[in-house]
Image (cartoon, rainbow, N blue to C red):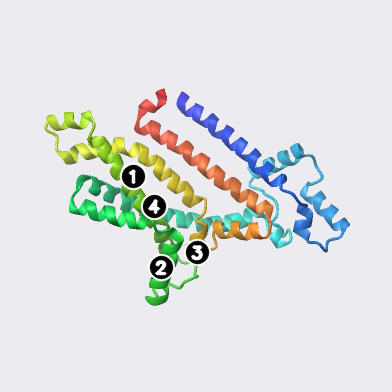
Amino acid sequence: MKYTIKKCITLFISLFFASILTFTAFHIIPGDSALSALGMDATEEQLEEYREIMGLNKSFPERYADWLKNALKGDFGYSSQYQMRMRVSTLIKERLIVTLWLAVLSFMLIVLVSIPLGILSARKKNGILDSLISLVTQVFMSIPSFFLGMLITLIFGVILKWFTPGGYVSPGENFGLSLRFMVFPAIAVAIPKIAMMVKFLRSSLLGEMELDYVRTAKSKGMKNISILFKHILKNALIPVITFLAMMLADILAGTILVEQVFNLPGLGRLLVSSIANRDYAVVQAIILYIVSVVIIINFLVDLIYQWIDPRVRRN
């Protein structure tokens, strides 16, 4: 219980400092936010009105307090790209659904494919199958997701016509059709990560197989398959969980280039367009989201560690 409370306190402190850094970073950028939003043709009265509405005339602590209070309620103000008619929270909510859908499919592929392949590769160490898996993973590790996305679009979209390049259907409209569109970008995101995960899991398993407790279990007559799934796999998964968490955070943070290749209306594309248009309110909210995702996932990993290996509580 003390371990969990300690981690919760660390979580809230980390999120608090992340919010301060995020807010500060976008308020020390040179330039006039009002002028960036309204353009060079805006009159002084319009600029003053905008500053008043957006709270830019207040002191830094007051602006941060107002921003944090609203952010905790999910209110990040208005997007300057839409002439103050579109809330940032609404924009992010619409795009977040796409990114989450892509993340879920990608992560499922990573787990379902990489864990069996990693176990198989470790069990067949130095065999033909292990060599083949190592060769394939080495190749796919070196290919970026966006390039895989281009190849998938060319082969399966343009040539075979299995899907319409640039198309997107939300799961709420038609789940089957949405899955058909999203599985291809999910594969593009997942394949390089599957390759890395297989290599990492194989190394972790082989490291555990050399330890004394494995030799002791064998001397007691336990079968190799039983030792693997009852003892080795559980211990080998501890460092693997961290690796999986990093992958999940990376996917949830927005696979910008893959979304661009497949023309998906996700957070990645919104971030790119907001940076190009100097829409700092949107960029600020997305950066805070990305940082928060990484912090929260690390917090959850610490709790999972405690559940898998109670010895972690004593560290």
Which residue is located at x 39 percent, y 52 percent? 193
- Which of 297/210 is in front? 210
Crowding near the residue tagged with mark 2, few <14, some 14–19, many ≥20 C-alpha atoms within 10 Å: some
Q: Which mark is residue 200?
A: 1
- Measured Cα–Cα span from mark 4 to mark 2: 17 Å
Q: Which callout, 4 or 2, points at the residue further toward the start of the chain?
A: 2
When the figure is inspected, residue 29 is found, relative to residue 212, above or below; the finding is below
- Badge 2 is on which residue? 151
Q: Is residue 88 left or right of residue 42?
A: left
- Tell me the amino acid under the disc marked 1: Phe
Which of the image's four quarters has the C terminus? top left
Q: CA distance from mark 2 to mark 1?
A: 26 Å
Does dot 2 land on a helix, a strand or a loop? helix
> What amino acid is found at the position of numbered circle 3 in the picture?
Ser
Q: What amino acid is labelled 2 in the image?
A: Leu
Between the C-alphas of marks 4 and 3, the distance is 25 Å
Q: Are marks 1 and 4 in contact (CB under 8 Å)?
A: no
Position of residue 44 in the picture relative to residue 261 (left or right): right
Any part of residue 102 in sight: yes
Q: Which residue is mark 4?
A: 193
Residue 1 showing in the rendered view: no
Q: Which quadrant of the rendered structure holds the N terminus?
A: top left
Residue 244: image location, x then y, percent: 40, 45
Q: Are marks 3 and 2 in contact (CB under 8 Å)?
A: no
Where's residue 87, x and y in %? 67, 55
Label 4, residues with CA under 10 Å away: few <14, some 14-19, many ≥20: many
Which numbered disc flags the more N-terminal residue, 1 or 4? 4
